[in-house]
Image (cartoon, helix red, strand yellow):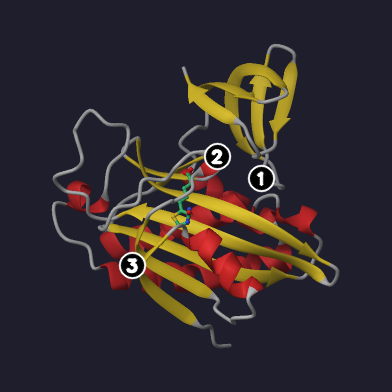
């Protein structure tokens, strides 16, 4: 199958812009930008998006109802981590629900915008990767970029191509077989497994316990004194302590 890809110098947010293009009847499947003026992160936060990052959004339709897409952020994270590893030879870990980390520092994040339709679900899958922010990265920050980590420039086109290939493959697997088919891959990259965590979110009481991986739907398992709890991605914020 073919996909239409568009590259822009700067947009507000590739997720927002791709949704607008599609709503306007334009058959763009993948939107890449050199920079974003209003990049969006999870939980309503901003995603600072200067040149030197990779900002990608991909539109896709899925066969089932939208509730089958709960683990889509985890799938995007898996694809991103695999692409980074293939391109840069770096070991990339995953922090539930969808942060990509290298040596404990965040290097990429994913943002999913879901859409429902009568004949199936659709989603815009956004991924932002810190590729080369040398000169902007301070050593005491909880984030890093690929160039600082490897000590050399990363070819952003190669990384984008690897990411698009990996996403195509992983999204097909997910659509056909669900997250269960990828649970073992998650476990191999899970940086939270065994860690003491504190989860909180609007309308949720705080949950304190030990992270014990994810279940076949991609929910985080936390062992607490009151028993095993399962967390949905959503608005949850997670701290290790
Ligand atoms: C997060 O970790 O909070 C998620 C960050 C997601 C950033 C990407 S960059 C491409 C796409 N467009 C956006 O506005 N956000 C996502």
Element type at mark 1:
loop
Looking at the rendered image, the quarter that the N terminus falls into is bottom right
The numbered mark at residue 218 is: 1
Residue in the image at 66% along x and 45% along y = 218
Residue sitting farthest toward the bottom: 1
Secondary structure beneath label 2: helix
Which x, y percent locates residue 123? 65, 62
Disc 3 crowd rating (10 Å Cα; few below 14, some 14-19, many 20+) is many
Spatial CA span between label 2 and label 1: 22 Å
- Residue at which label 2 appears: 44
Determine whether 197 is above or below 217 in the image: above
Residue 201 in percent (x, y) is at 64, 26
Which mark is nearer the camera, 2 or 3?
2
Q: Which mark is residue 7?
A: none
Picture coordinates of residue 193, whole percent (x, y) = 52, 32
Q: Quadrant of residue 7?
A: bottom left
Of the image marks 1 and 3, the number of the one nearer the N terminus: 3
Which residue is identified by label 3? 159
The residue at the point 71 percent across, 56 percent down is 69
> Residue shown at 77%/58% (left/top)?
66
Which numbered mark, 1 or 3, is in the foreground of this view? Answer: 3
Which structural element holds mark 3?
helix
Report x, y in % for residue 137. Answer: 20, 40
Residue 34 appears left or right of 118: left
Which of 57 and 193 lies nearest the eye of the viewer?
Answer: 57
Of the two numbered discs 2 and 1 in the rendering, the one whose residue sits closer to the viewer = 2
Residue 195 visible in the snapshot: no
Q: CA distance from mark 2 to mark 3?
A: 27 Å
């Amino acid at each position: 199958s073919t996909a239409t890809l568009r590259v822009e110098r700067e947009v507000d947010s590739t997720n927002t812009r791709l949704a607008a293009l599609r709503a306007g009847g334009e058959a763009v499947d993948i939107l890449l930008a050199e920079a974003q003026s209003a990049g969006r992160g999870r939980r309503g936060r901003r995603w600072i998006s200067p040149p030197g990052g990779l900002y990608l959004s991909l539109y896709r339709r899925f066969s089932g109802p939208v509730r089958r897409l709960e683990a889509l952020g985890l799938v995007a994270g898996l694809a991103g981590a695999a692409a980074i590893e293939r391109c840069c030879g770096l070991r990339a870990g995953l922090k539930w629900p969808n942060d990509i980390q290298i040596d404990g520092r965040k290097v990429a994040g994913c943002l999913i915008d879901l859409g429902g339709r009568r004949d199936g679900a659709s989603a815009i899958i956004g991924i932002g990767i810190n590729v080369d922010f040398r000169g902007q990265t301070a050593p005491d920050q909880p984030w890093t970029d690929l160039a600082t980590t490897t000590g050399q420039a990363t070819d952003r086109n190669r990384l984008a191509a690897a990411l698009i290939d990996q996403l195509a493959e992983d999204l097909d697997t997910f659509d056909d077989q669900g997250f269960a088919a990828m649970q073992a891959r998650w476990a191999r990259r899970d940086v939270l497994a065994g860690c003491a965590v504190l989860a909180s979110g609007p309308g949720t009481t705080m949950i304190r316990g030990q992270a014990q991986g994810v279940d076949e739907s991609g929910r985080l398992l936390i062992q607490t004194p009151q028993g095993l709890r399962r967390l949905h991605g959503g608005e949850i914020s997670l701290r290790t302590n």
